[in-house]
Amino acid sequence: MSKPNYTGIYNMVSQENFEEYLAALDVNYALRKVVCILKPSKHIEHDVNSGKMTIKTVTTFRFSWLTHFQTKELNWDGDKLVCVQRGEKEGRGWTHWLEGNLLHLVRKQGLSRARKTALHIYIIQYPEEYIK
């Protein structure tokens, strides 16, 4: 199965359970409130041939980026991009997938019953052909 090309600029259109997810990560109350009102965009450059992908998350306050190749922490599950994050909180990670012009992101934190998830949906603003 060929991997989908994620290249594009996506704007957030909805989010669910994000504040609960941040609380499970021990993010303080004031910061959770600020973060939850932000509407970030995702700027993704994906070279399907090499596997290299750069994901920039941009808001009016700051941006962060992740550049990766295929690693043990980041892999494909069919056409979904799955990341298992290592660090202070066990069971943390995220999954991206495309449905039409929507980019879905599910963030997970915790194991079993204590698991908290957040869903973000982005709509494509500029598809691949406008970025190059």
Image (cartoon, rainbow, N blue to C red):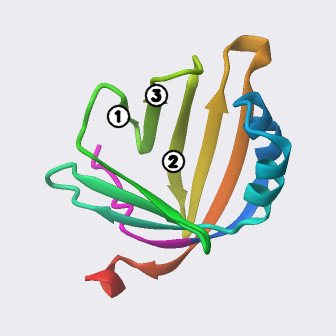
Amino acid tagged 3: Val
Residue ranking furthest to the top: 112
State which quarter of the image contains the C terminus: bottom left
Q: Residue at x 41, y 45 (%)?
A: 79
Residue 65: where, in percent of width, then height?
A: 40, 56
> Of the residues tagged 1 and 3, which is closer to the observer?
3
Vertical side of 56 occupied by 108: above or below = above
Residue 75 falls within the magenta-colored stretch: no
Distance between the alpha carbons at the discs numbered 2 and 3: 12 Å
Report which quarter residue 70 is drawn in. Answer: top left
Q: Which mark is residue 75?
A: 1
Q: Which residue is mark 2?
A: 96
Please identify the dominant SS of the magenta region. Answer: loop
Could you tell which of marks 1 and 3 lies nearer the N-terminus?
Answer: 1
Residue most extreme to the bottom: 130
List the residue tagged with mark 3: 84
The three-letter code of the residue at mark 2 reads His
